[in-house]
Image (tube, rainbow, N blue to C red):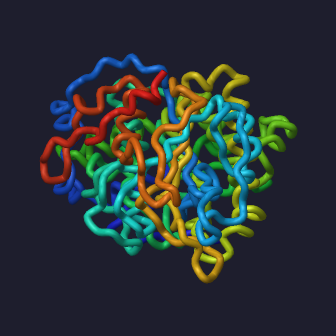
Amino acid sequence: MEFHAPTSSSHPPGASLLSRRRTLQAIGAGLAAFCSPLTALESRVQAAVRSGSAKRVIMIFNCGAPSHIDLWDPKPFADSTVKGEFQPIETSVPGIQISELLPEMAKRMDKLAIVRSVHHKHSAHNSGMYWSIAGRPYKQDSTLINPSPADLPGFGTLIGWLAQRDGYSKAVPPYVITPKPHCDSFVYLTPGQFGGCLGIKYDPFVVNEDPNSSKFKVRDLALSSDMTHDRFERRLDFLKQIGSLNEPIHSPTATEMDTFRAEASRVITSGEAEQAFDLSQEPDEVRDRYGRHSWGQSHLLARRLVESGTKFVSTVNGPSITWDTHKDNFNGLKNRLVPPMEKAYAALLDDLEERGLLDETLVIWMGDFGRTPKINKDGGRDHWPGCYSVVLAGGGVRGGQVIGSSDKIGAAPESRPVTPGDLHATVYRALGYDPAAITFQSSDGRPIPLTEGTPIPELLA
């Protein structure tokens, strides 16, 4: 499926370290009206002592919203209009059952923590995804929305921002989305996943290619074959000389352009980023283990990136809202959606553990919201933000447990209600940040805490 650009007011999806510089030229000094310069942001940041177990995050995001009842929170004693076709199975942890669709996850339950009482109030895809990834409600509950420079950022953006605030210097981008951005139909992109009010310096690097393609190669990460390092350095020097002849421009945009130029130069001359994105270096058996499909290879790419220093990778199990099972929910889950997702998920956890990375890598599985307890006339389930499940593993999370519970039909939290903000606070705490003690500045000048949620102590080992 081809990617189509959003409306002109949104950040361009897939902006790489180089294309972001071109974006800045197009946006110009008008960005200053929406966001404060980095120096102003830094002056408002209250430092927090980093003491968490996690060093990085991988978020597996199922755009379109998978059914919690048919995966992580089965309701075998509900009537036939609710419980669906799938039976619960025992897991490696006595007393915890999940769906028969997830036999590999059942074997690894000792590593997983299932939160069964997550809830919010937005039932449209893009606003629901925003609430999930930003931990806050969007200003309207709608799918027909796009990112803007005034958006409050999601936790991928904020974790990348924190990393750069703390001196991040790796050649790989600190925040990557693969293979495509969160969106509805590639026309309406989800707000929150880009830099928002922090500025496009903090946009993610969106791969925008299929990592499973035999021709997969991320552009602009290395010098062209006819360009030597010496020649490139001479061009940079010449560019500086030209710039010195002009009257200096004192603006946040000009400062960011210089920053992007230096960042891009470092990336393409080091070769480290090109190596990290090069899946051809992986043995065939490893690639097969993840699954020879876009989701599998995106998960493998995520492992390579965090191994190289990236702080946050969002693997979007798309394309678009492919988990939106209003029709034929059960066949869709059984035959098309769950098998590749579970294969990739299991391989990622095992690979991280074998490489000694799981204890320092927090892996989150989530979607926009849940799906209706009642099965509709088309054999599907509709949107349901009132209660759903999120799963966490690694990165200091205590596995082998269930946090919270839903009622007898999975419609509402019955115990230990959890908000997306609470999950975000837990992630920040796992990374060693005090979510209430660090603020960023909104487009209207207000200091905003990383999240308004409260960490979930039961999750943290």
Viewer-nearest residue: 127 or 260: 127
x then y, percent, for residue 288: 84, 44
| Relative vertical location of residue 400 with respect to residue 346 in this rendering, above or below | above
Seen at 13% across and 46% down, the residue is 446
Judge left or right: residue 23 versus residue 398: left
Give percent across and percent down for residue 75.
60, 56
Residue 42 visible in the shown view = yes
The quarter of the rendered structure image containing the N terminus is bottom right
Residue 219 in view, yes or no: no
Name the residue at 81% across, 37% down. 286
Percent x, y of residue 242 = 33, 43
Which residue is the extreme one toward the right? 285
Q: Left or right of 363: which side holds 368?
A: left
Residue 98, position as x, y percentages in the image:
66, 46
Q: Nearer the viewer, residue 18 or 79?
A: 79
Q: Is residue 158 above or below residue 78?
A: above
Q: Is residue 424 above or below residue 355?
A: below
Residue 166 vertical placement versus 27 (above, below)? above
Q: Residue at x 61, y 26 (%)?
A: 358
Q: Quadrant of residue 147?
A: bottom left
